[in-house]
Image (tube, grey):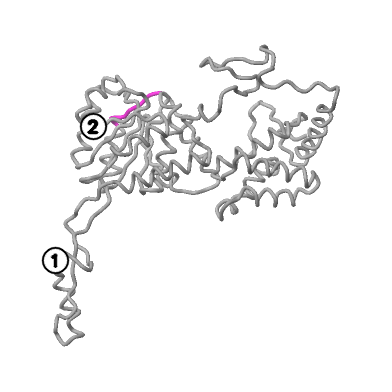
Amino acid sequence: MNPTRTQHAVPPGQSLAGFASMLRDHGLKVGVAEQQAMLQAALALGALRGDQLRAAWRAIACHGARDWRQWPELFERYWYAHRLKGQIRVSGQMRASRDLRQAVQNLHEQMQRSETASAPGKAAPLSASEAPASSIRTDDAGSPRAMGGASSTEALHQRDGQMWLPQELGALQQLARRITSQLRPRLTRRWRTAQPGQRLDLRQTLRRSVAWGGQPLRPAWQVQRRETPRLFILADVSRSMESHAPLFLRIARAFAVAAQARVFVFHVRLAEITPLMQRDSAAIQEKINAVAAGFGAGTRIAQSLQDFVRVHARAQLNRGSRVWIFSDGFDTAEPDALPAALRAVRAHGARITWFHPTREVPAAAALQRSRICVDRFIPLARLSDLAAARPLLH
């Protein structure tokens, strides 16, 4: 008997909803319309046409070449997880099976039961507003929730720290491109060839004159080179930032793609995750969750900043660079250590912006002493906060 399977079949609607949620987590734009189309395809094709159903769902859910490539892996991972080798984990908990054929068969049975229940003389099932009070409970925040995890409030209003829906990810990526485009480029001491230009490139002009018998008939010009500021993002993933880390890492990944930013995470030590953030793989959502989970308590912001200046960004940190810090500012080191580390960053000419998850600047002693070293404090608890701060990020 396979230990990863159980005799209790998961409800078909929940199976399809879970599959759609997994697709959204991996970047596929599967909304309500696509989910309804997948349901209609399952009812039309039946349980015995698995290959045709897979092809139909692929045509519905995939909107680009990237979605088309990662579809086989996602489909196998969800519906045929028992076939995957080397990924068996013993957790002590029994999880409902995800059998595609059984789920489609249950869909047909459910439709038949619904038609029978809607016949005259039969009592219709209770709606959510007519459910008995005993079937509804409240969570720790006091919001009513139905038994089994259902909620009487809109889920979108409770996803401030996740933003896994395609429309939210698209809005975040577009916002990151807008903020990147408004970063003020800085003038350098180097010049590049351009037509027209600001000054004469004598060497290139003489080379061109050879073809004209030494006559400078085609002068070359130069303009001063401008460079886009380098962006560095340091995200706090310690225990105190556990609920905010998914949002911060999503924002960091958007800027790693749009602005080629270098991304670091820190708790008791600093680690660079730029290659992970710039990678566009099917399991990127799971990897981001793995980055934010499993860290122990304690935060050493000052030590992490020192490692950032001395080791990781020593050659690239220069005048005009932007350093964004996502943290609540609570440091286990001495309060004077953080101002000294921030001054070391500013000594390279970088501009520091501190994003904190609260409305007001956190009352941490180390952060209060560091206010003079930070160019700007910005509250960031949801995507709308980043959009409101866009005029300040230049």
Task: Tell me if residue 126 comes above or below residue 281 in the rendering.
Answer: above
> How many numbered marks appear?
2
Quadrant housing residue 26: top right
Q: Give me the residue at 65% from left, 22% from top.
A: 148
- Per the image, label 2 sits on a secondary structure element best described as loop
Q: Give me the residue at 38% from left, 44% from top.
A: 176
Say left or right for 134 vs 329: right
Q: Residues within 10 Å of mark 1 (few under 14, many from 20)?
A: some
Q: Nearer the viewer, residue 291 or 284?
A: 284
Cβ atoms under marks 1 and 2 closer than 8 Å? no
**Could you tell me residue 279's position as x and y percent?**
47, 48
The residue tagged 1 is 199
Of labels 1 and 2, the one closer to you: 1
Mark 1 or mark 2, earlier in chain:
1
Quadrant housing residue 4: top right
Quadrant housing residue 240: top left
Numbered range of the magenta stretch: 297-303
- Per the image, label 1 sits on a secondary structure element best described as strand
The residue tagged 2 is 374
Mark 1–mark 2 Cα distance, whole angstroms, equals 38 Å
**Could you tell me residue 25's position as x and y percent?**
55, 40
Looking at the rendered structure, which numbered label has been put on residue 221?
none
Say left or right for 301 vs 120: left
